[in-house]
Amino acid sequence: MADSVRPGMVMCTSCPRNCASERTGGRLGFCRTGSGFEIASICVHRGEEPVISGSAGICNIFFSHCNLQCVYCQNYQISRNNTPSKCMELGEVVSAVARILGEGVGRVGFVSPSHMIDQMKTIIAALRGAGCRATIVMNTNAYDRREVIESLAGLVDVYLPDFKYADRALALEYSGVEGYPEVAIAALREMYRQKGSNLVLNDDGTAASGLVIRHLILPGHVENSKACLRAIAEELSPSVHVSLMSQYYPTPAVAGHPCLSRRLTGEEYEEVLEEFERLGFYRGWLQEPESSDSYRPDFTKGHPFE
């Protein structure tokens, strides 16, 4: 097995930033990652939506760094592009995943893979070559090139994008990205073209194929959340599965921020939920307002969720 990935890394256009960086030669772009497998954690996660994690959980592969730099990121320990990252060999990755799958877990999730598309494809091919037959889940921030999503047809079973912003100015201020709504909607349209509104379920009730769109409600930004829901309903369909998340909690990076330094209120969540219902959404998952106490990973530990 090769220990680094070459295709697409000479003039990198993996994500919409189109850095054209030479990742194989050390001339790094925005994400500051090379052509190898820079992975922060491979672990079982049981905190996803029920159709994603099931009772056994999902084997999540958390890539280091990110093509967005959200000031409030709850995975900030591994997502910051100025933090050190470790590089694994492909054989190590496959062995770690195979061990977890051997314990009865049937799904493999790739978390924040937008800047690591070639690596993700290589891992999927290696897992299949090793005889691992797992449901493949792409957990993405939706800042993805439509053409890249097209190339994943037949490789990704379940798309799990997080549609963050309908407000361009907010995306620039909080995540340092131009044109997020337009790029994300184009990517979501392609995911929807491939998967449609219906989830295909396994016998145990977990998703075998489909699309689930997540939205994290930010405190003080109810209007952005309502606009995101309207965009999903108008551009795709109110019949898609939506996970409406209230799990936001303020990290040290936003202490003292006028909006982001506090948790979401029950009133804010209810206002967004009213829009959810008004728009005709009827499939998906809701969270209790106090859920922010339940989703705090610590990537300094061997298992960040325990």
Image (cartoon, grey):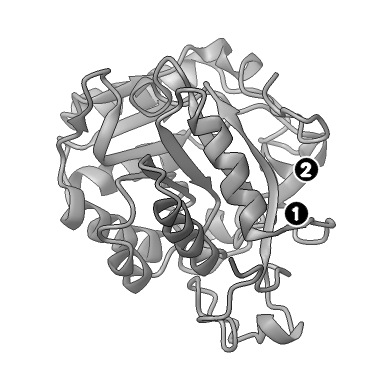
Taking 13 as reference, is 160 left or right?
left
Measured from the top left, where is residue 134 in percent x and y? 37, 39
- Residue sitting at x 44%, y 43%: 224
Instruction: Give coordinates of residue 287: x percent, y percent.
Output: 44, 17
List x then y, in percent, for residue 262.
Answer: 69, 25
Q: Which residue is mark 1?
A: 80
Q: Are marks 2 and 1 in contact (CB under 8 Å)?
A: yes
- The picture places residue 230, in percent across and down from the top left corner, at 26, 43
Tell me the amino acid under the disc marked 1.
Answer: Arg
Frontmost residue, 163 versus 94 = 94
Give the Cα distance between marks 2 and 1: 7 Å
Q: Nearer the viewer, residue 125 or 141?
A: 125
**What amino acid type is highlighted by mark number 2?**
Gln
Local crowd size for mark 1, using a 10 Å CA cut-off: few (<14), some (14–19), many (≥20): many
Numbered mark located on residue 41 in the image: none
Q: Which residue is mark 2?
A: 77
Depth check: give the residue in front, 269 or 215.
215
User: Disc 1 on helix, strand or loop?
Assistant: loop
In terms of secondary structure, where does tag 2 sit? helix
Q: Is residue 148 above or below residue 248?
A: below
Quadrant of the image containing the C terminus: top right
Residue 9 lies, with reference to residue 185, above or below; the image says: below
Residue at left offset 36%, top offset 65%: 182
The structure residue drawn at horizontal position 53% and vertical position 59%, both measured from the top left corner, is 169
